[in-house]
Image (cartoon, rainbow, N blue to C red):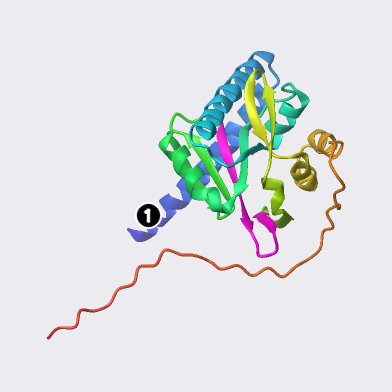
Amino acid sequence: MELKTCRNDKRLITMGSYEVLLRTKIEDFLFHFKWYQRYRNAEILELLKIVVAIIAENNLECFVSGGIAYDALRGKLTRLHKDIDIAFLARHRSAILSAFEKAGFCLDEKSPYYIVGQMKNGGIHVDFFVWRETAVETAEIIYDGVLTRVPSHFFSYGQKVCLNKVPITLCGNEYFKSIAPFIASEKDRSFVLQLDTPSLDCARPRMETVIRKINLKVFEYATIQEG
């Protein structure tokens, strides 16, 4: 019975992988049709309104980042977006995640630095990027096997812009330029590198030994001493 159950579990995992792949291929195909592009743009803007409202109503200290932010700086939507990115310092993590949970988002923690939030009706998701502060006035994040470190004062201010009449508070240009090497879209990366910023040292990749504490939920049992 246990062997049969194990085989069934493996089949479910395999079918789940096929389902994700199939959904991605269907969506990539639909992206070629303008009617689907209009539908998805309307969907992302509606989610953006919800995200902006949650941030404003709860006075959350976080900023919109990622592809939506780059298009907001451009002043228009230039491509389809599959998510909305939010960046913040770890000390604000609890308040931010709590506010989104209360607003109906289901949160899936992928790592201490990265959480995916999705509304219960599905659709486009929100990616939360948590930057941990260090003792030397920097903030860092580990994502996709790479550690990125920036001055923590990058999170002390933002810039207000509008995207299709939706007011948004973005990270500063220094933040965007500092993460340019990790931006997947070549078009977005080129745009970010041209942003106006004060003098900023270029990223110099290097190998570094990183040691992190692992926090785990612990269940500890002990036998009851009789007598």
Residue 177 x, y percent position in the rendering? 80, 43
Q: Label 1: state its secondary structure.
A: helix
Question: Does the magenta portion include 130?
Answer: yes
Q: What secondary structure is the magenta-colored segment mainly?
A: strand
Q: Residue furthest left?
A: 227
Q: Quadrant of residue 41?
A: top right
Q: Residue at x 76, y 47 (%)?
A: 179
Can the viewer see residue 145 in this picture?
A: no
Count how many numbered circles sit on residues in the image: 1
Whether residue 208 sits left or right of residue 1 in the image: it is right
Residue 178 x, y percent position in the rendering? 78, 48
Q: Residue furthest bottom?
A: 227
Look at the image and tell me in which quarter the N terminus lies. bottom left
Q: Residue at x 52, y 46 (%)?
A: 14
Whether residue 174 sits left or right of residue 52 in the image: it is right
Q: Over which residues does the magenta segment extend?
A: 123-142
Q: Is residue 142 above or below residue 108?
A: below
Residue 28 x, y percent position in the rendering? 67, 28
Residue receiving disc 1: 5
Q: Residue furthest top?
A: 35
Question: Does the magenta portion include 4?
Answer: no
Question: Type of residue at label 1?
Answer: Thr
Residue 129 x, y percent position in the rendering? 61, 46
Can the viewer see residue 126 in this picture?
A: yes
Look at the image and tell me in which quarter the C terminus lies. bottom left
Q: Is residue 11 above or below residue 25?
A: below
Q: Nearer the viewer, residue 55 or 40?
A: 55
Q: Nearer the viewer, residue 21 or 213?
A: 213
How crowded pointer 1 is (Cα within 10 Å; few <14, some 14-19, many 20+) is rated as few
Whether residue 208 sits left or right of residue 218 in the image: it is right
